[in-house]
Amino acid sequence: IYFGNDKGHIFAVDAKSGKEIWKFSTKNEVYSSAAVSEDTVYFGSDYGNFYAYNATTGKKKWQVKLTDIDKKFRKRIRERTAEEVPVVSGGLIYYITANNGKINALDTKTGKIKWSW
């Protein structure tokens, strides 16, 4: 089972025992569900970050910044970009960034943005 929390962590937990397998800190809140495909976990965190991790080991495969916010406003404005559920299909992962309403198509192997609309 894979899930995040408002403390900026993503967890992998064994479904049978409930024991933690691995944990990763994003340093930003994680409100979206994770998507899992071909032993990779995909998820976003606040402030526009999107990640791919090995589902078994927790080793980071890639990270990409999908949105940008002026740093001087970070303390006053929440950059909630991690509320949507990612979808994996045909070698691409689709993810909507909530702050600007864009849908992004990323290459599942590299994290490279193929298109954004």
Image (tube, rainbow, N blue to C red):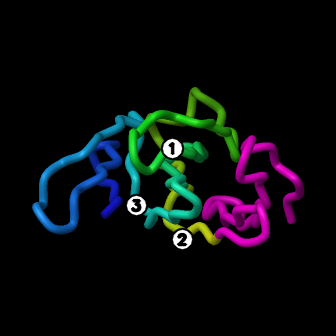
Residue 97 among magenta residues: yes
> What's the CA distance linking mark 3 and mark 2?
9 Å
The reply to whether dot 3 and dot 2 touch (C-beta < 8 Å) is no
Please report the bounds of the magenta region as a residue range: 88-117
Compared across the picture, whether 12 is left or right of 73 comes to left
Q: Residue 60: x, y in percent?
A: 51, 34
Compared across the picture, whether 43 is left or right of 27 comes to right
Nearer to the camera, 56 or 47? 56
> What's the CA distance linking mark 1 and mark 2?
16 Å
The reply to whether dot 1 and dot 2 touch (C-beta < 8 Å) is no
Q: Compared to 112, does 82 lie above or below?
A: below
Tell me the kind of residue under disc 3: Tyr
Compared across the picture, whether 63 is left or right of 39 comes to right
Which of marks 3 and 1 precedes in the sequence?
A: 3
Quadrant into which the N terminus falls = bottom left
Q: Compared to 89, does 44 lie above or below?
A: above
Identify the residue shown where x is 22% and y is 59%. Answer: 14
Residue ID for mark 3: 31
Residue ID for mark 1: 53
Q: Tag 1's secondary structure?
A: strand
Compared across the picture, whether 77 is left or right of 70 comes to left
Q: Is residue 77 visible?
A: no
Identify the residue shown where x is 57% and y is 27%. Answer: 72
Tell me the kind of residue under disc 2: Val
Q: Tag 3's secondary structure?
A: loop
Identify the residue shown where x is 29% and y is 50%. Answer: 11
Residue 42: which quarter of the image? bottom right
Residue ID for mark 2: 85
> What's the CA distance linking mark 1 and mark 3?
17 Å
